[in-house]
Image: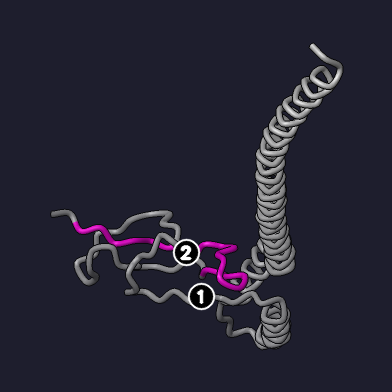
Amino acid sequence: MSKEEKIEEKIEENINKEAELNKTITELKEQLAQYQKKADELNDKVIFLTNDYANKVKEKGEQANKIVQDKLAELEKKHSEIIEDTKKYGIEKTASKLIEIIDQFKKAIGFESNDEKVKNFLIGFKMFASMFDSLLSSLNISEKVINVGNEFNPSFMDAYDVSNDKEYNDNAVTKVVSNAYFLHDRVVKHGVVIVNKINE
């Protein structure tokens, strides 16, 4: 083989190698483009998942915050109710003792006398009783007057005895020993009565 033929062969060999290299480069470029496409898709997915996660975290945070705010509002309301209840009924025990004293005092001055000196004392004591009533009223304590013939109501009456009187209906009050007292809407002293029970 001549020198020129060898050169031509080498050139042809190089051309073939270059063609193979170009083919390989083209294939690699295509693979790279595919990888780049997959990387872009994965990147988009990561961005979507990150945003979705961030939105869910934000949503859960808002829900948790609302729950906390609702609980705080509920506790605040309960606290206010307790304070209001304490203001309203805080004197209940003291009121009960005070009512007992006033009630006994009223019973003591409730009798009639022909003695002028006793009558004069009773007038003064009745003025005190009126002042006691004003005091109770200022404390939002009211007397619930029970009358003979009223139907017995266990929510604010206690029966200390029973009678069997044909003049009155069954379960009617036949005698009032003492009236009931309320602090606002709560019973602080039950009225004491005798209740009629008609034997069938």
Q: Position of residue 76 (x, y in %)?
A: 73, 62
Q: Which residues are magenta?
A: 180-198
**Local crowd size for mark 1, using a 10 Å CA cut-off: few (<14), some (14–19), many (≥20):** some
Quarter-of-image position of residue 155 = bottom left
Which color scheme is applied?
one colour
Label 2 element class: loop
Label 1 belongs to which residue? 144
Check residue 2 for magenta coloring. Answer: no
Which numbered disc, 2 or 1, marks the residue that appears first in the sequence?
A: 1
Quarter-of-image position of residue 119 = bottom right
Left or right: 10 with respect to 43? Answer: right
Q: Quadrant of the C terminus?
A: bottom left
Q: Quadrant of the N terminus?
A: top right
Q: Confirm or deny contact between disc 2 and disc 1 (CB under 8 A).
A: yes
Label 1 element class: strand
Residue at left offset 38%, top offset 61%: 194
Label 2 belongs to which residue? 156
**Amino acid type indicated by mark 2:** Phe
- Identity of the residue furthest to the right in this view: 3
Q: Position of residue 40 (x, y in %)?
A: 70, 46
Residue at left offset 82%, top offset 15%: 2
- Identity of the residue furthest to the top in this view: 1
Which residue occupies the foreground of this view, 125 or 2?
2
**Amino acid type indicated by mark 1:** Lys
Query: Which of the numbered marks, if any, corresponds to residue 125?
Result: none
Q: Position of residue 132 (x, y in %)?
A: 71, 79
